[in-house]
Image (cartoon, rainbow, N blue to C red):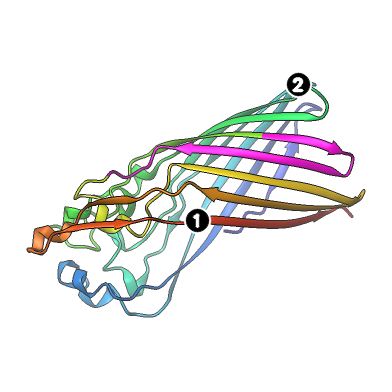
Amino acid sequence: MFAPTVAWRINEKHALGVSPLLVAQRFEAYGLQAFAPSSKYPTKVTNNGHDVAFGAGVRVGWYGEFNHWLSAGIGYSSRVYMEEFDRYKGLFAEGSFDIPANYSAGIALRPTPQWLVSLDVQRIEFGEVNSLSNGVLNSLPPGAQPMGSADGSGFNWRSRNTYRVGIAYEWSPTLTLRGGVAYGKRPNDESINSVTFNLLAPNPHRAYSAGLTWKPSVDHELHIAMGHFVEQTYRGPSATARVGVGGTEEISPHVEMLMVGWTWKR
């Protein structure tokens, strides 16, 4: 995602920003032959190498400072409409994988010059994108709504809210320490209409993070952060029961993140 940004300072306390979202997706899949008979395009489901799709959207935001201890912000990102994956249009509903719209609001409190506490909520409209919101069973058994069509199988995701709390402490003029926690109800459930596809994206509920910013000089900053998703086992009945197989499927994802950034002023 490439997001060049322009911002306007309305006055000393308030600013607006806008970013066109220019997006490229790369996708590749193997071993999904079992789904080919249920597809509108049986030869464009799996084992076709990598494919690339492009799309665009827009993001806008406002930031305001009300006094020395309270600031706030609001942001909105439109749905990013993507091209079809030509080689895999028999896998995704409508042949594409749009990025859902999201909007968020947050506040930051500074009880002392050294401490900063932020709270925000974000709404992600997963339910507005067919390839995400359609149920797994839509295309099962073969003869139902074919995969690749507007009503074909998806991940059975619903729109959800994510809540975040962050804390920053200015240890010294050159070192700032940070920590945070995020919670969001899983967009999918553990029903037969969800599990089989969602083994690819099980979505843990909670995440924790910690990081720091180090300023070796006035014009340079090094940022380091680590994140951990709390492990949860995701399991439920297999959608293959609709074609006479059945059973239970499960996955226990382990997700760790490491982020490093460098900023400088000229």
Q: Residue at x 73, y 56 (%)?
A: 261
Q: Quadrant of residue 187?
A: top left
What main secondary structure does the magenta stretch of the protein show? strand
Q: Quadrant of residue 241?
A: bottom left
Q: Amino acid at mark 2?
A: Pro
83 horizontally vs 109: left or right = left
Q: Amino acid at mark 1?
A: Val
In this rendering, the answer to whether 184 lies above or below 55 is above
What range is drawn magenta here? Answer: 167-189
Give residue 175's position: percent from left, percent from top: 83, 44
**How many numbered discs sit on the rendered protein?**
2
Give residue 129's position: percent from left, percent from top: 35, 49
User: What is the crowding at mark 1: few (fewer than 14 residues within 10 Å), some, or many (at least 20)?
Assistant: few
Nearer the observer, 90 or 120: 120
- Which quadrant does the C terminus fall into? bottom right
Q: Residue at x 60, y 40 (%)?
A: 60
Q: Residue at x 64, y 43 (%)?
A: 18
Q: Earlier in the sequence, mark 1 or mark 2?
A: 2
Residue 143 in view in this figure: no
Q: Secondary structure at mark 1?
A: loop
In this rendering, the answer to whether 136 lies above or below 206 is below
Determine which of the numbered discs, if any, sits on residue 73 in the image.
none
**Pointer 2 residue:** 111
105 horizontally vs 101: left or right = right
**Pointer 1 residue:** 255
Nearer the observer, 102 or 110: 110
